[in-house]
Image: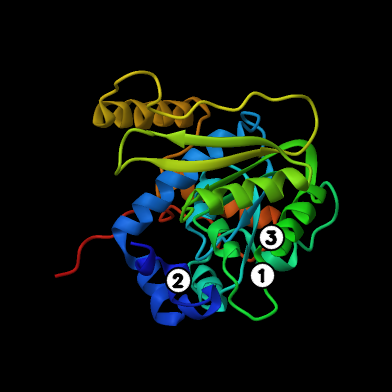
């Protein structure tokens, strides 16, 4: 129901208070869904394989989507309006740089900075007028026009969103096209009430690009079977790229080495690095 939507209850910087931020990041189901959406958004970016990219995460929250970018070897900057969500991200020691800001005020980055942009469950917030001077079409245009400027030509921006209705979706797409983007909507599992997900896939100039196809759009497909296939494919791709399993010794060593390159203080490697501790009873 529309009344149960978070953006209908309070502005994001108020709704995502300290309690809500911690609850959001400690909910295992929420983490799983956020990770799945983030990985799908990254897939739609079609980034070059085996080459680190510099990505902007709009509405990064506590850094769940940023962790997916890190796991795939990319560097990222996250921007979010909620200081409490960013505080949780800092506590979780995410590797991306974090900025507090309202996306409706525009993106404060230099032209041609980013190789790609992702955003999970954030864009629909711009359709609300939380303050008397808020004008949703103007804020959307401000966001998209400044976003277009800070992206490299030919780069993609992928927004997973929950539009309230078709009018809201039309408003968002109109303002993005007005700002110079091309592209359109990619819908995964359009015939499923539960699995259906929408991704606005935008192209920032460059050569003409074909809009990706949504998952589960070719005939009658068993959703559970398709989801397993997609997960297996994703795992094969990770293995082919030589990515280490998360939390393994190799994964920890790779993470520490990245931090050293970033100039951060890291504990020295020892024979105990990554070793599982015995359970204490």
Residue 72 visible in the current orientation: no
- For the view shown, which residue lies furthest in the right direction? 111
Q: Position of residue 239 (x, y in %)?
A: 45, 29
Relative to 26, is 142 on the left or the right? Answer: right
Q: Position of residue 30 (x, y in %)?
A: 35, 58
The residues tagged by marks 1 and 2 sit, at their Cα atoms, a distance apart of 17 Å
SS for dot 3: helix
Closer to us: 94 or 142 = 142
- For the view shown, which residue lies furthest in the top direction? 219
Quadrant of res 201: top right
SS for dot 1: loop
Quadrant of res 181: top right
Q: Position of residue 257 (x, y in %)?
A: 61, 50
Camera-nearest label, 3 or 1:
3
Q: Looking at the image, is 232 positioned above or below residue 132?
A: above
Relative to 277, is 120 on the left or the right? Answer: right
Of mark 3 and mark 1, the one earlier in the sequence is 1
Mark 2 — residue? 8
Q: Position of residue 103 (x, y in %)?
A: 67, 64
Of mark 1 and mark 2, the one earlier in the sequence is 2
The residues tagged by marks 3 and 1 sit, at their Cα atoms, a distance apart of 15 Å
- Callout 2: 10 Å neighbours few (<14), some, many (20+)? some
Mark 3 — residue? 137
Q: Point out which mark residue 102 bears.
A: 1
- For the view shown, which residue lies furthest in the left direction? 281
Taking the spot 74% from the left edge, 24% from the top edge, the residue there is 208
């Amino acid at each position: 129901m529309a009344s149960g939507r978070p953006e209908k209850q309070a502005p994001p910087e108020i709704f995502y208070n300290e309690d809500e931020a911690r609850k959001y990041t400690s909910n295992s189901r929420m983490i799983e869904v956020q990770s799945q959406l983030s990985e799908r958004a990254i897939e739609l970016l079609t980034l070059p394989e085996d080459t680190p990219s510099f990505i902007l995460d709009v509405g990064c929250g506590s850094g769940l989507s940023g962790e997916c970018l890190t796991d795939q070897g990319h560097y990222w900057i996250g921007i979010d309006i909620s200081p409490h969500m960013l505080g949780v991200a800092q506590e979780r020691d995410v590797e991306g740089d974090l900025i507090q800001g309202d996306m409706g005020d525009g993106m404060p980055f230099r032209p041609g900075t980013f190789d790609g942009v992702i955003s999970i469950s954030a864009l629909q917030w711009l359709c609300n007028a939380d303050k008397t001077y808020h004008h949703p079409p103007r804020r959307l245009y401000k966001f998209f026009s400044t976003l277009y400027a800070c992206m490299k030509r030919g780069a993609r921006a992928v927004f997973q969103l929950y539009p309230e209705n078709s009018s809201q979706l039309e408003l968002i797409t109109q303002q993005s096209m007005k700002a110079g983007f091309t592209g359109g909507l990619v819908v995964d599992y359009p015939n499923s009430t539960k699995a259906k997900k929408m991704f606005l896939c935008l192209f920032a100039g460059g050569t003409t690009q074909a809009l990706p196809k949504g998952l589960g759009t070719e005939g009658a497909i068993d959703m559970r079977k398709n989801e397993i296939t997609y997960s297996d494919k994703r795992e094969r791709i990770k293995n082919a790229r030589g990515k280490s399993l998360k939390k393994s010794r190799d994964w920890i060593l790779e993470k520490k080495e990245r931090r050293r390159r970033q100039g951060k203080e890291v504990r020295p490697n020892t024979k105990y690095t990554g070793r599982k501790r015995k359970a204490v009873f």
